[in-house]
Image: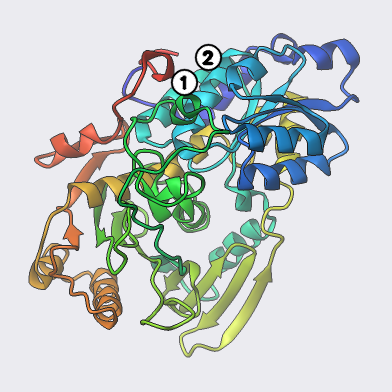
Amino acid sequence: MSNSLASRRSFLKGSLAAGAALTMPACLKAQGANDRIRLGLIGAGGRGGQLADGFSKLRDAKIVAVADPDESHAGGMARKLGARPYADARRLLEDKTIDAVIIATCNHWHCLAAIWACQAGKDVYVEKPLGHNQREGEMLFAAAKKYDRIVQVGTQQRSDPVQQEIKDFIDSGKIGKPKWIHANRYGVRGPIGKRAAPLEIPSTVDYDLWLGPALDEPIFRNSLHYDWHWDFNTGNGEMGNWGVHILDDVRNVGTRDRCTMPLRVLAGGGRVVWDDAGDTPNVHFAYYDTGVVPVVFGLTNLPSKPGAKGSLHYKGTGSGYVIECEGGWYAGGRGGGAACDQSGAQIAELKGNSGQGHDANFLQAVRARDASILNSDVVTGHHSSGWCNVANIAYRVGGAFSQEEAMEINRGYGPWEDLLGDMEEHLAAHGVRLSDKSIRLSPVLEMDPKTERFVGPTAEAANKLLTREYRKAEFTIGETV
């Protein structure tokens, strides 16, 4: 694949050009469009169960097979749904009667499972973040185009009608033009433990399949499942967990998807206070030069101060975003928000449904063989995930710094200075200083949005993290799909 990605419009146009008759799933052609779409569920943990519940409520779909390398997950979910259980997703994908798959695996499996599904002629609903790394998202984009597959990404707020209402309100000029956006994920979590000896893998787990593309490294946390989020080998930290939802809103409502990838990114943070086995930051802060409207992002999993039940907030928003405008602001998140004038008086409230129709939107596109119907297609999901990926990369290539250096690197830009001040105060409450060795800061990383590669003097180390080292050839995503 070339370094340059085709535009979303070109992708959708090319995808439709092949014609619905050539891409209609076999069972729909044979039995008629009124029959249920047969689904396979790949990944039967907590999120997989939530998606299974949602899809099972839709009359025009039925989950007929479940795959998970933990037989207790696969077996339990299969019994609940009256479906066939598999350990290996490849066996599920061999079933010609399955039209589409729902992928709710660990992040490191998202793109490989989705690419295999495209190659097997299945449409795909895949959880966020789309790519565990940026290159994998590009490869899935290429596979969806090559095999003419419908691919929906699980940023479900894109299916909430309130999103258009918010955009219409901003465009009305009632609070003036946007100046910048403050996005944040402020939500309390706890440490994941730190064992003296590596974790013993449960006997119900086929660990080779669970690892898939990931490296076989000893695990010192207390739990295999879910806490893989906080290990860069298998997850993307809170930035790629909750951050992708928030940054997808920022792209949709704030920049109107005009910024595919940032022109420049600057990020810092650390894993502090907890002495645990995680290696992703539990405090993270970033600046994005979008070329449209500047964006700053603050993240913490710590309480606002030791002993507090809640975390930080910015203008009343914990997990969401604030569009700062000339005459006020809009503060929102999943399910809507409110607008205030410069005095802080509320002048509008907008309520939504948090994207409850996202799964139905996917099925609608599958039946119509029309990728343009999707509210969060593969290209949109790739770029929203990409904003998280580059913030993680910036953190990983960063180093120790002083408070003065942090200010100087983006001096004069008020929102960045304010964010640093908030982070400094927050960390100080926990006995940590920004200048401590546990906190790192990147240089300003420049990107070429067309190639989605870093450029300039800091590019070499950052570009290495756009992909990963793969453990086995059978689990490697190659240059061609």
The residue positioned 29% from the left and 59% from the top of the image is 286
95 displayed left or right of 271: right
Which residue is more in the foreground, 17 or 464? 464
* Residue topped by disc 1: 142
Residue 229 drawn above or below residue 91 = below
Residue 76 drawn above or below residue 122 = below
The kind of residue tagged 1 is Ala
Where residue 88 sits: x, y (%)?
Answer: 58, 21
For the residues marked 2 and 1, what is the alpha-carbon distance in whole angstroms? 6 Å
Residue 240 drawn above or below residue 14 = below
48 displayed left or right of 342: right
346 displayed left or right of 227: right
Locate the C terminus by quadrant. Answer: top left
Which residue is more in the foreground, 71 or 67? 71
**What kind of element bears circle 2?**
helix
Where residue 442 sits: x, y (%)?
Answer: 17, 54
Where residue 282 sits: x, y (%)?
Answer: 34, 61
Q: Quadrant of residue 414?
A: bottom left
Which residue is more in the foreground, 66 or 360? 66
Question: Disc 2, disc 1: CB below 8 Å?
Answer: yes
The residue positioned 53% from the left and 81% from the top of the image is 340
Where residue 32 sits: x, y (%)?
Answer: 89, 17
> Disc number at residue 146?
2
The kind of residue tagged 2 is Lys
